[in-house]
Image (cartoon, rainbow, N blue to C red):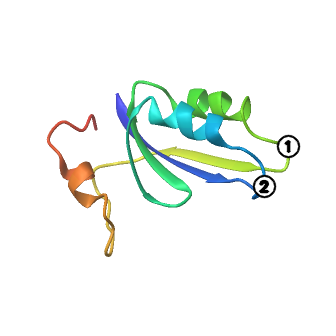
Amino acid sequence: MSVLLVACDLKLPDENYSEVRQFLAKFTHCRKLDSVWLIDTKWSPDQMRDGLNALIDRDDAVFVTRLAMNWASSRFGGADWLNDMNRNW
């Protein structure tokens, strides 16, 4: 298991991206920035990207990477979530 950082740049503001939000919300997650999700999952970055690609438009962008325990932030509301002993680093 790992913590993935998922960033989505969804280009069309009028599009209904509720499927993307519902897909990501199924995982243990933290969303404290508009287009960035932290996901605690068994999925690999490739699997997460592929799952999202099925839901987004051709002009949208997705970036997925595995996080490590050595992270830093400033005024980030998800710090407690990341520091939780239940995270699967």
Task: Classify residue 50 by image quadrant.
Answer: top right
- Give residue 2's position: percent from left, percent from top: 36, 34
Secondary structure beneath disc 2?
loop
- Reply above or below: 73 against 71: below
Q: Residue at x 51, y 55 (%)?
A: 36
For the residues labelled 2 and 1, the Cα–Cα distance comes to 15 Å
Question: Mark 1 — residue?
Answer: 58
Compare residues 57 and 14 and report the one nearer the observer.
14
Of the two numbered discs 2 and 1 in the rendering, the one whose residue sits closer to the viewer: 2
In the picture, the disc for residue 84 is none
The 10 Å Cα crowd at callout 2, few under 14, some 14 to 19, many 20 or more, is few
The 10 Å Cα crowd at callout 1, few under 14, some 14 to 19, many 20 or more, is few
In the picture, the disc for residue 14 is 2
Compare residues 84 and 2 and report the one nearer the observer.
84
- Give residue 59's position: percent from left, percent from top: 84, 50
Location of the C terminus by quadrant is top left
Left or right of residue 81, residue 62 in this image: right
Q: Residue at x 34, y 27 (%)?
A: 1
Task: Classify residue 18 by image quadrant.
Answer: top right
